[in-house]
Amino acid sequence: MEMKIPFAVQNRFFPADTMEADGEIGKRFDVFAYERISSDFAIREILREAENCIRDKYDDENVQGLWRCEFWGKQIISAVRVCRIKGDERLKEEIRRSAYRVLSFQNESGYLGAYKNDEFIRRADPQACRKAGVWDFGYNWSVWGTKYTMWGLLECAQLLDDANIVDACRRMADQLIAALKKQNMHLTDAGVMHGLPAGSLMKPMLLLYRLTGEKSYLDLCLDTAAQWEDENAPCAAIIAKALTGAPPANWYEIDPYTDSGYIAKAYEMMSCFDGLIELYRVTGNEKYLRAAVMFWDSVKEDEENILGSVGYCERFVSAAKYPDCATEICDVIHWMRLCYELFCLTGESKYMEALEKAYLNAFLAGIWEDGKSGAFFVRSAGRHWNAEWQVDTKYQHCCVNNAARGFINAAESAVMRGGDGLYVNQYYPMRTHLGACSIRVSGGYTARGMVTLTVRGAAAGEKLHLRMPAWSASTEITVIGGESRICTARGGYETVLLSGEDQVIRLRFDMTPEIIDYAGDRAAMFGALDARDYHIRRWCDAGVGMCDRKQMMPHPMSVIRRGPVMLARSKRLGAKEEDMFSGETVWGLERNVSVQPIRHDCALSAVRVTITCPGGKVYSYDMCDAATAANRDLEDVRFFTMYI
């Protein structure tokens, strides 16, 4: 579908024309895509139920507004992405049918969502909520739902090349703009969390602007950005805050019992920066990109947890300092999205480094092995918090409906084309085509640190740029029939000049295990809990959430990284509960560590770890990658641990 408005700034890097994940990761994607997206059950039950959330319009059945409105948009975006990557014509037809069923629910006003009152866009009155006996936070997710419904429809329109769907989105946008004008509101005044969820509408609104050329849609986005630049505005002011370089956890004075308690909510804030990056592409305003880059840098430093995601239990709270990991899958996905989008514009390898860590550890840990569901929060010990179906539905969850996009963002990042050649960013098994050139990535990257690249159809003299992982102290690159060299650079790219003939290139990475002493200030985190704060209770009280303190790190302990993956002990490999949670640790000791690969049919990595300490004390553990240690719906609250 042709864009009427071109980007002012083009990406520098682009994904392969086709891509197909192989090996264990490919299997996990295929199973999940079938069970949640393309199977008869997924179409008949999961997708149809999501449609009916919009049809029935009961999100505002009481004084607050709920979030059933998001489910269809998330599910159909995932379906479109799966359809594109797999070329599934049957799924394409089901997407068309679903889009038109949803279009039949559009009001005469143009509103298309799950709220009966199409002008209910302000935060609900907390006092009225309290009087009605519902949570007094003042929920209203109407504009957030509009974002996902519009985005989903625009994805459908581009897949199907259907202008009628774009016209319906225009009516949606026009209705919302009129409602904002009628109530004298900025977009950032809408909904909860000082307008963060509503402000993330920027991304699909800019897509609609580029498809139609309608300037009022761009104006709405520019006004939103202007609010974000104004420190005195009543919204989150994320541009002004990001440009200070301070971490998001320090941006606001937080009162956990009011709307400000959510102002640093990770998923919604990262979604806004995703939109801001798009606004940079549309306008060329360097301030927008600079704010996004500075935001990413501060989050990476202050919020990255030991599984490579960011934040703790949905919020930015200086999670890098926390002794325990609890990360929402939506947060992982949108952290990966930011990494991908910033790499496309800048080509800096640090974004691919962070994406790899998040994908192979936090994200994959949250996808259940049967493909039917996943985690709400991924943990570092005990079990993961299962994604229970939300808001009185049978099959809908904010994270699970989003999850296919995580697989696809990772696949799109694996092998890319830039202005000066081809870039291999990820090394898990993958088949890709870029024009006449094909690149196959094979071997045992996560298990053995060995990768084979098979390149066919490349032009003579074309450059192949290979990302050097920062965790590999020494990487051996061998071009079969040609050169061999050792690279000691941590990060960045090494370049191989292609001959124009079919070529095989082998890489061997340094898989020396690293024991990381993880101190964490447990007393600071848990010393003064306030039982009124739901977010704190869900972190620490097994009666509310799944983060029982008995499974958390009781005192300073260590974790092990081997290659790109974090390791864990698990009952899947025969670990005993009394050993895993004894509290005994190698933290702070002098020690030597060695590993020996062991067989495990579905792990990305499985090893026997031997740690020798002074005095001859020897610890021996069978460990696997943390993503495989507990990737299932569990009742057992002491099933695995990353800590030693």
Image: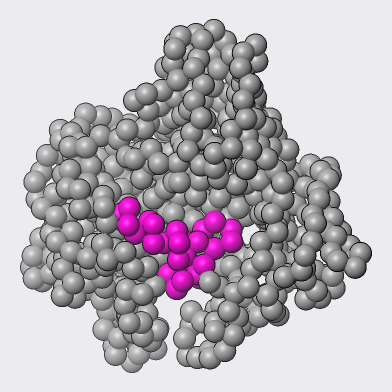
Residue 290: image x %, image y %? 26, 52
Residue under the point 62% across and 25% down = 485
- Residue 254 lies in what quarter of the image? bottom left
Q: Is residue 578 inside the magenta stretch?
A: no
**Residue 607 visible to the viewer:** yes
**Residue 22 visible to the viewer:** no
- Vertical relation: 294 (above or below) 595: below
Q: Is residue 301 inside the magenta stretch?
A: yes
Residue 125: image x %, image y %? 26, 84
Stretch of the chain drawn in magenta? 292-320
Residue under the point 46% across and 71% down = 318
For the residue pair 340 and 644, the one nearer the viewer reads as 644
For the residue pair 182 and 304, the one nearer the viewer reads as 304
Lateral position of residue 600 relative to residue 251, left or right: right
Lateral position of residue 392 relative to residue 282, left or right: right
Residue 115: image x %, image y %? 29, 66
Residue under the point 45% across and 20% down = 463
For the residue pair 363 and 167, the one nearer the viewer reads as 363
Residue 532: image x %, image y %? 47, 90
**Quarter of the image where the C terminus is located:** bottom right
Lateral position of residue 408 relative to residue 578, left or right: left
Total tally of numbered discs in the picture = 0
Lateral position of residue 307 relative to residue 205, left or right: right
